[in-house]
């Protein structure tokens, strides 16, 4: 609490909340935006929380959604706090000064974690630095894993996405009282949070709830419904129960999480396998979000900033020693990557020719990264020139083998490199000037939609954040993109549909 200042109190549609002043920033944690999704509300769309009397304390992070822990191999790099309790549909607000007069830009953050892990309580995502620089920051929790993305015959799909829409509606209705401008909301997310952001761009129920969007290391996609059903069936088989929402709701919650973790360990962004994902449901997500954005049928007038890290795949392969295993497999691994990416031999040959000294793991990793992330984001930018901005994060971690891996940019975007949790992935000595440049670009984008470099056009400008000052490269992915485009033509696939899971 800042000396001489009383704790801030703000009224919301459901009741008043009391936050804290910390380092001159008003912070409100654990505010419910929907009722606890358990009991009769389990596996159902979110509903508003019950109104409370008096002033609710918002001094601590609220409960996190049920989730299994990371494996030991990943836990050494990624923190994932667990806060018990059923009231897990909550959010946090950091603001320079509450009150409706400020009308400051707002950034709403969707955490990553493969739709199975993560929360708004991860220290790297602290919103203090955005509030320090004049942006109201909101971070949310949403249902994960089978609770949020299981596909059942007796429950609506995409519960986690519905949670996110409910949180955005809360922001629309409530953020002015915290000093934010509801007409200047930027929705941002990383990994699964970026995939969710892409879906929200295409979700009719989310239209008008945000003005700008940031997709970090995640592209718009719809998962194959059968793949998600297979994941649910495998969890059900371990629990020896029917694959229905009714049966899952009656299962012991701890056993359900253990079964989900056991089945999920066979899944990987590089290697594939069963998993949870957003699905086309004819309701909240009526169309494939990538195709809707590429064809101009979604989110007209929304400014986009999108990007990736240079070595995304290293976080997926380095923990657990998968790099060495894939390198030993050699051509077998390359054949598996070809099947994973649904591409012809010429694409694989082209990638090997572009990286003549690379091992199989690097070739496979970059091939799958382009298939999942870079090529679809390239397509979106091509379809929305003038209002799309593209970046690449290229600074290598100080830890062995990680390079510029998936999630490494987060400590720079949030300017949170001084936290121990950020150093778990970046190591020691992360350059503050790089954090100043990246965080400043995100602040500018939230303020006015221009992060400080040229918008996408025929020259394909990509802002590279690496060693030294940021620079703009033109067309760094064009050669790879041409390989995919030639493959589409040669295989007689519908022109432009380059990326399908």
Image: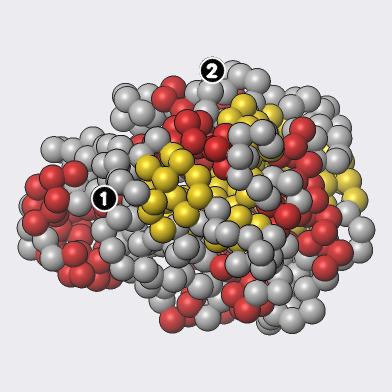
Colouring rule applied to residues: secondary structure
- Report the side of 319 relative to 253 (left or right): right
- Report the side of 355 relative to 110 (left or right): right
Secondary structure at badge 2 equals loop
Identity of the residue drawn at 26% across and 50% down = 36
Examine the image and state in which quarter residue 83 appears: bottom left
Other residues around mark 2 within 10 Å, as few (<14) / some (14–19) / many (≥20): few
Location of the N terminus (image quadrant): bottom right
x, y percent for residue 365: 60, 61
x, y percent for residue 351: 69, 53
x, y percent for residue 240: 7, 63
Is label 2 or label 1 in front? 1
Q: CA distance from mark 2 to mark 1?
A: 34 Å
Secondary structure at badge 1 equals loop
Identity of the residue drawn at 46% across and 70% down = 80
x, y percent for residue 299: 57, 23
In this rendered view, identify the residue nearer to me: 144 or 464. 144
- Report the side of 162 relative to 237 (left or right): right
Identity of the residue drawn at 50% across and 31% down = 172
Query: Residue 297 has which mark?
Result: 2
Location of the C terminus (image quadrant): top left
Determine the residue located farthest toward the front in the rendered image.
4
Other residues around mark 1 within 10 Å, as few (<14) / some (14–19) / many (≥20): many
Query: Residue 36 has which mark?
Result: 1
Examine the image and state in which quarter residue 352 appears: bottom right
């Amino acid at each position: 609490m800042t000396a001489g200042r009383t704790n801030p109190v703000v009224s919301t549609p459901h009741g008043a909340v009391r936050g804290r002043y910390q380092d001159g920033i008003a912070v409100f944690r654990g505010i419910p935006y929907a009722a606890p999704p358990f009991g009769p509300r389990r596996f159902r769309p979110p509903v508003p929380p019950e109104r409370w009397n008096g002033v609710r304390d918002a001094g601590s992070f609220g409960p996190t959604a049920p989730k299994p822990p990371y494996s030991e191999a990943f836990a050494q790099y990624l923190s994932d706090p667990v806060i018990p309790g059923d009231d897990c549909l909550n959010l946090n607000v950091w603001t320079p000064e509450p009150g409706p007069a400020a009308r400051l830009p707002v950034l709403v953050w969707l955490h990553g974690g493969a739709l199975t892990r993560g929360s708004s309580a991860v220290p790297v995502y602290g919103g203090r630095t955005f509030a320090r620089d004049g942006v109201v920051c909101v971070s949310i929790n949403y249902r994960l894993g089978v609770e949020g993305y299981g596909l059942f015959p007796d429950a609506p799909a995409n519960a986690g996405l519905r949670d996110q829409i409910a949180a955005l509606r809360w922001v629309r209705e409530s953020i002015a009282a915290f000093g934010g401008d509801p007409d200047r909301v930027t929705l941002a997310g990383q990994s699964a949070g970026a995939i969710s952001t892409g879906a929200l761009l295409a979700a009719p129920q989310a239209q008008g709830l945000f003005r700008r969007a940031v997709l970090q290391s995640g592209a718009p996609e719809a998962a194959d419904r059968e793949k998600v059903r297979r994941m649910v069936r495998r969890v059900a088989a371990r629990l020896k129960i029917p694959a229905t929402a009714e049966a899952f709701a009656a299962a012991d919650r701890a056993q359900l999480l253990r079964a989900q973790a056991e089945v999920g360990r066979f899944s990987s962004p590089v290697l594939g396998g069963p998993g949870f994902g957003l699905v086309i449901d004819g309701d909240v997500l009526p169309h494939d979000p990538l195709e809707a954005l590429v064809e101009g049928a979604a989110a007209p007038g929304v400014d986009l900033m999108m990007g990736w890290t240079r070595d995304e795949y290293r976080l997926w392969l380095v923990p657990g020693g998968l790099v060495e295993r894939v390198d030993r497999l050699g051509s077998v691994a390359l054949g598996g990557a070809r099947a994973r990416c649904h591409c012809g031999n010429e694409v694989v040959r082209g990638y090997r020719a572009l990286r003549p000294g690379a091992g199989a793991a690097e070739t496979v990793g970059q091939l799958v990264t382009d298939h999942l992330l870079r090529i679809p984001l390239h397509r979106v930018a091509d379809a929305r020139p003038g209002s799309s901005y593209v970046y690449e994060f290229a600074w290598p971690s100080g830890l062995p083998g990680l390079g510029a891996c998936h999630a490494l940019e987060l400590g720079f975007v949030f300017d949170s490199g001084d936290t121990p949790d950020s150093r778990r992935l970046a190591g020691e000595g992360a350059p503050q000037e790089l954090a100043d440049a990246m965080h400043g670009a995100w602040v500018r984008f939230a303020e006015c939609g221009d992060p400080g470099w040229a918008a996408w056009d025929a020259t394909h400008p990509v802002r590279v954040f690496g060693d030294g000052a940021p620079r703009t490269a033109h067309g760094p992915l064009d050669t790879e993109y041409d390989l995919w485009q030639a493959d589409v033509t040669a295989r007689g696939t519908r022109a432009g549909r380059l990326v399908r899971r």
